[in-house]
Amino acid sequence: MKALHLMFLLGLAILAFGLNLLVGRDGSLLAALMQVARGETSLGTQILLELRLPRSLLGALVGAGLGVSGAALQGFFRNPLADPGIVGVTASSGLGAVIALYFGLASISLLMVPVAATLGGLVGVGALLLLAGQRASSTTLILSGVAVSAVASAGTALLMNLSPNPWALAEIAYWLMGSLADASWNEVRFATPLILVGVSALLLVRNDLDPLSLGEETAHSLGVNLPRLRIAIVLGSALAVGGGVAVAGAIGFVGLVVPHLLRPFVASRPAALLLPSALGGAALLNLADLGARLLSGPGIPLYLGVLTALLGAPFFVWLVRSQRGRAL
Amino acid sequence: MTRLEMRDVSARYEGALVLDQASLEATAGNVVALVGPNGAGKSTLLRLAGGLLAPDAGTVELDGQAIDTLSDRMRARRIAYLAADQAVAWSLQVDRLVALGRAPYLQPLRQLSRSDKDAIAQAMQTADIAHLAERRVDTLSSGERARAQLARVLATRADVVLLDEPIAALDPRHQIRVMDIVRAVARQGALVIMAIHALDLAVRYADEIVVMADGHIRANGPAGTSLSPDLLAEVFGICIDGGLQPNSARLID
């Protein structure tokens, strides 16, 4: 990718961050921003600093994690349909988090939910790798993802079924729909290290994804350490997705759409796709969150995960159709 | 001078013995052709020679050093490998495909160096694909794609070049072109070991022919002598009237 494209994406991510930070249904927080600059405090500056700032930061972080994992999983499985949601990582992360919520582990330490979500993601990617193998056809990959998702969803449904009261049930259900509405500095503190470590692990091994386009054996002959690459992909995507799911619930399709839109700008090189996908994911998620906030009626929130699914699912259908009949 | 030595190498695949105590010595500057029916063990022998597969018994040494003691990167710099399956997963540009041959030299998070770019340009020149540099791999003909993959292998500038049936899908003209390139690579000082089905081309281009059947090396010697009529009959179940002649096709420009 040319430096110019990268700068454009960075600008877009910053713009989206700024818009989600400042724009709301009740007008902009520009005045509050000025007050912050002058060191004054008001209700506006509190909203800005305690609600919007962590929310927009999380939007960028979670989006970057989803975008990078999507690009890395697509490169690793050599398949443009790989996405944390479609291959079941999101659902297994979700199950991990729901287990932590259900058993009240969050009362032991607030870190338990992110940790459980990450562990769930790890189990999910591991199971996918066992089920599908690495050179999976689109069909095998998606069916394996469906299987992983089905098991995770069944577990989640069981816990919802057994939940002691309607409030606990509602908490899990709303949380699963995916939202940044509860974002606070606590969430930022939990998610940041997890997502950054995951994203870094994926970025560090990205050069191995190019030789992998020629198949595992040829990649090995070109010096790629395959076991190390597998571990980095599994750990990295589990952390990058799990950290996001832990604080924002299940947000689908970002990891599918972003790498696909950016692939032409990197001449289809899987390694070159990771960094732009991080920026693109950060931009898209903040824009989607802004959209979800603006579309929400008074007292009727539109959930971010619902919005990305509504936009992403038709795109997925189109992608499956365009993949049909291809050898890949 | 580069020297590859395999001693009493055996390999199993899912329990079955696919290579049984094979021994082979080869030195730089030569083209060694592996011939034999499908399933004879040619690909397995190449994988073992390239350190991509660990033998169940026996040793593989490169210049006296056991190949499994080399790091992945060092091994990849010295031994280049072209698999029989030449699929490319993404719609890569040809020059990016060839650049993958430099992967063993690429430092993490770094761009291609000057010497990388030189190696890539020269490899594309040798394989006569410089004019295709900006094309997408999936828009090439089989012949062009084979040469692009060959250029990728050459870009590594390895001492040992292993090719698994590089001309299997090509028309007669492209077969000659690829074999000319192979010959030139050996002349420049590399050791080339290739699996090949076209016996007349093997006789014409190889310095040494290794005849394999059922996981055994049945004969090994200079081109022309190792493929006796008796062995042809026994190993391939064919008889050639007038004896096996070297391919004599010439390219017309």
Image (cartoon, coloured by chain):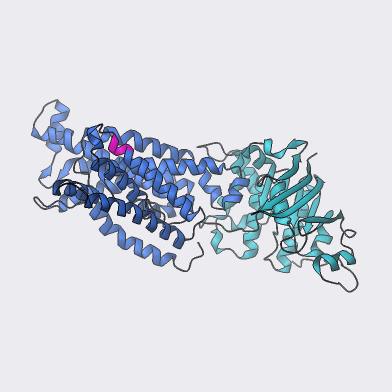
Instruction: From the viewer's perspective, tell me whether residue A97 is left or right of residue A7.
Output: left
The image position of residue A296, as x and y in percent, is 14, 52
The answer to whether B204 is drawn above or below residue B95 in the figure is: below
Extent of the magenta region: A109-115
| Total marks in image | 0
Q: Colour of chain B?
A: cyan
The image position of residue A167, as x and y in percent, is 14, 46
Most extreme residue toward the bottom, as rendered?
B241
Relative depth, front residue between A176 and A9: A176
Relative depth, front residue between B223 and B106: B223
Q: Residue at x 35, y 61 (%)?
A: A316
Quadrant of image for the C terminus of chain B: bottom right
Relative depth, front residue between A92 and A13: A92
The image position of residue B174, as x and y in percent, is 71, 64
Q: Residue at x 26, y 36 (%)?
A: A105
Relative depth, front residue between B17 and A321: B17
Q: Which chain is blue?
A: A
Quadrant of image for the N terminus of chain B: top right
The answer to whether A256 is drawn above or below residue A202 in the figure is: below
Instruction: From the viewer's perspective, tell me whether residue B232 is left or right of residue B179.
Output: right
The answer to whether A328 is drawn above or below residue A69 in the figure is: below
Q: Is residue A276 visible?
A: no
Q: Is residue B175 visible?
A: yes
The image position of residue A117, as x and y in percent, is 32, 42
